[in-house]
Image: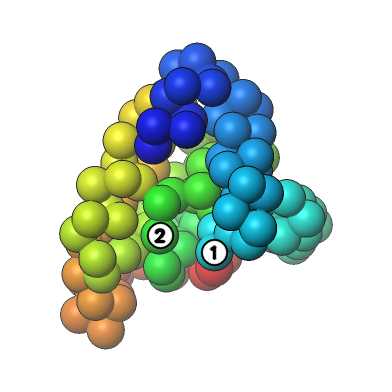
Amino acid sequence: LKCVIDKATPCDVDGILLALDDFGKDLGWAKFAGGSKGATMVAALRGGLPPSTQHSGVLEIGTYWGTSSLRVAHALPLGVPITTLELDPVHVAIARVLLAFAGVAVKVCTGHSQLLLPRFRSAFAAVL
């Protein structure tokens, strides 16, 4: 989070994503969907989501730091609900702070997907 807060400004999603991509480059690898991985994921979503997405939303399984959720929220029309599931509570805390810093509304749920998925009664337009 420090790399993002030091390099980006609140609610500047492009700046935040750039700071995360730079951090991944500095590491030499990135577990999160940055750079070309992130661009590929967003392109696939934009090209394959049905019109019902506005109401049913997108589900991500495996939040990590919330980078993919941030990219998806930034790429899709405003108001598309995004829900993400993460087992590790430390990653959940990081993701929630990152998404709040970006000013993006994403529901971040803590727990194992096997236990969380039955709680969702509606189908999602896309699952990541």
Q: Nearer the viewer, residue 94 or 29?
A: 29
Residue carrying label 1: 31
Q: Amino acid at mark 1?
A: Lys
Q: 10 Å neighbourhood of mark 2: few (<14), some, or many (≥20)?
A: many
Q: Name the mark nearer the viewer: 1 or 2.
A: 1
Which residue is at 58% across, 43% downward? Answer: 23
Q: Is residue 74 visible?
A: no
The foreground one among 117 and 56 is 117
Compare marks 1 and 2 and give the one earlier in the sequence: 1
The N terminus: image quadrant: top left
In the image, residue 15 lies at what x, y percent? 61, 25
Q: With respect to residue 61, does 114 lie above or below?
A: below
The answer to which image quadrant residue 103 occupies is top left
CB of mark 1 within 8 Å of CB of mark 2? yes
Count of numbered circles on the image: 2
Query: At 31% across and 65% down in the image, what residue appears?
Result: 86
Q: Please, is residue 37 above or below residue 79 in the view?
A: below
Give residue 27's position: percent from left, percent from top. Answer: 58, 54
Residue 64 is marked as 2
Give the quarter of the image for residue 117.
bottom left
